[in-house]
Image (spheres, rainbow, N blue to C red):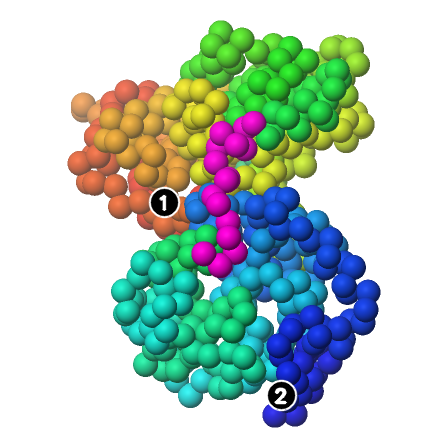
Amino acid sequence: MEEKETSHRIAASDDVEVSTYLEIARELHGEQLTSEVETISPEVREAIAIIDFGSQYSHLIARRVRECHVYCELFPYDESWERIASLRPKGFILSGGPASVYQAGAPLAPAQLYASRLPILGICYGMQAVVYQLGGQIAPATKHEYGQTVLQTIDKESPLFAGLPSSLLVWMSHGDQVVELPPGFKALAYTENSPAAVIGSDGNIFGLQFHPEVAHTPQGKTIIENFLYRICGCQGTWTPRNFINESIRTIKEQVGDGRVICALSGGVDSAVAATLVHQAIGNQLTCIFVNNGLLRREEPERALNTFRNNLKMNVVYVDASERFLKRLKGITDPEVKRRRIGEEFIKVFEYKAARLGKVDFLAQGTLYPDVIESTAKETKAAAKIKTHHNVGGLPTKMSLTLIEPLRYLFKDEVREVGLALGLPEDMVWRQPFPGPGLAIRIIGEVTQERLEVLRAADWIVMNEIKKANLYRQLWQSFAILTDLRSVGVMGDYRTYGYLIAVRAVTSQNAMTADWARLPYDLLARISNRIVNEVPGVNRVVYDITSKPPSTIEWE
Ligand code: XMP
């Protein structure tokens, strides 16, 4: 194959002696490599660097690693080596990806990664990149493998397979495959169509042709765990308690005797961020809770009670409902609604913050998926479908330093931390709620009267879902007030009433979602109660579209 001579490649020819990867990396990158690599001292911090080649499962790899109580971060494949090395990883995982190693400009791992001699686990495309970069060969497979297949182990003693049977179900999704292993490598397991479905070097580099991170590989987590614990030597120190202790220490250090403000929304992220900051610096923190009048029934009261009375935090409560309603008068375009709500929020927040005197820091509940998304390469970024105002929507004029204690956490970790901090279960398990609130669940103009109708219907949906013990299993469940009216009959009278839609979805991360198969009896109860208890509503429909092609919210 001619393309094999590409300059990306670390091993320029197959006869290179690959006893040390450092040698090969030097071929391309020269002597300066050594000093950079030596900055890694894995003992200092237990972490794994995941190199992202653009697989739709990369986040899942990170989540699995964290579930094994090992800290990890995801880096785009072309991230600077300095940045990756500053994590001081104990090992690397290379993700899958849509490319083929022989494509022009195919993404490859930084050469220094091999030179570090730290353990490497390549997954799917990640394994192909390892093979290619270290002198083996990849070619299009004669038979593509998609879906579940049986893996048979060859080397039963490999630490990767500790505690596993000799045959297991794995999930494949690849078109290329390994046709020649790099020097020093051997096949550790095979499947019907892949003679080298798992490979290992005589050092500590491994490759899996399948995806251990997905649920369709039932024992995938054990393989990841084996890599982390038995190959990288991790101890599993990433626990909520350790995270809390470390955060409290760093927040104290960062803030000193400065003052911090935080916007509470009633959501779990800002609640956990504020509580963490409060535990670190107590009354140096002031929270501002802006009631925009677009919250669910009883939410402002409940949140206020938790923060003020139970957690004894300083909370400035602002009822700005009327201001928001005025700004939304006559507005029907969803994006204009979002923009006005975002702008109004900033104005109210800045006004209140200015009255607190000198403030130095702003605490925010930004989560890792937001960070990953906002640092994603322009070319990779998805087309903008809706503007979400919860990220980066806060004051720019105030020149405050940001404190984002949850910046590297996934949602499930935030919940664990919330529980460990003593936040009420209700708040910790609250379903996500959009920043613009009920305004984007009212199709057409938002008025006080329409808000009341929606709140009453939404209350019934929530109440019935909770009674049916489904609240936690659903990503979101709520009511929408449409701008449709339809004819009905109540008693002997013709009615012309509002149409309420009910939406309930399951999802892992809101990027995709499926409509929930709620039991008919439950749907019947919800529908009955809404038409009987909410004046003006005479018809209820259930939304049975998934995302895509729909979105979770209606606006
Ligand atoms: P969509 O409707 O885009 O929603 O499928 C995905 C997730 O994002 C939430 N969402 C928002 N959150 N500001 C927010 O803070 C917004 O403008 C916004 N729009 C949608 C939505 O509730 C779902 O969880």
Give x and y (percent) for residue 104.
67, 79
Viewer-side residue, 71 vs 395: 71
C-alpha distance separating marks 1 and 2:
49 Å
- The verdict on residue 44 being magenta is no
Query: Which residue occupies 53% across, 24% down?
Result: 271
Which numbered disc covers residue 506?
Answer: 1
- The verdict on residue 235 being magenta is yes
Amino acid under label 2? Asp
Which residues are drawn in magenta?
Answer: 230-245
Query: Which residue occupies 72% across, 59% down?
Result: 37
Give x and y (percent) for residue 199.
46, 74
Quarter occupied by residue 488: top left
Picture quarter with the N terminus: bottom right
Viewer-side residue, 266 vs 346: 266
- Mark 2, residue position: 14
Quarter occupied by residue 435: top right
Q: Secondary structure at mark 2?
A: loop
Quarter occupied by residue 106: bottom right
Earlier sequence position, callout 1 versus callout 2? 2
> How many numbered circles are shown?
2
306 above or below 441? above
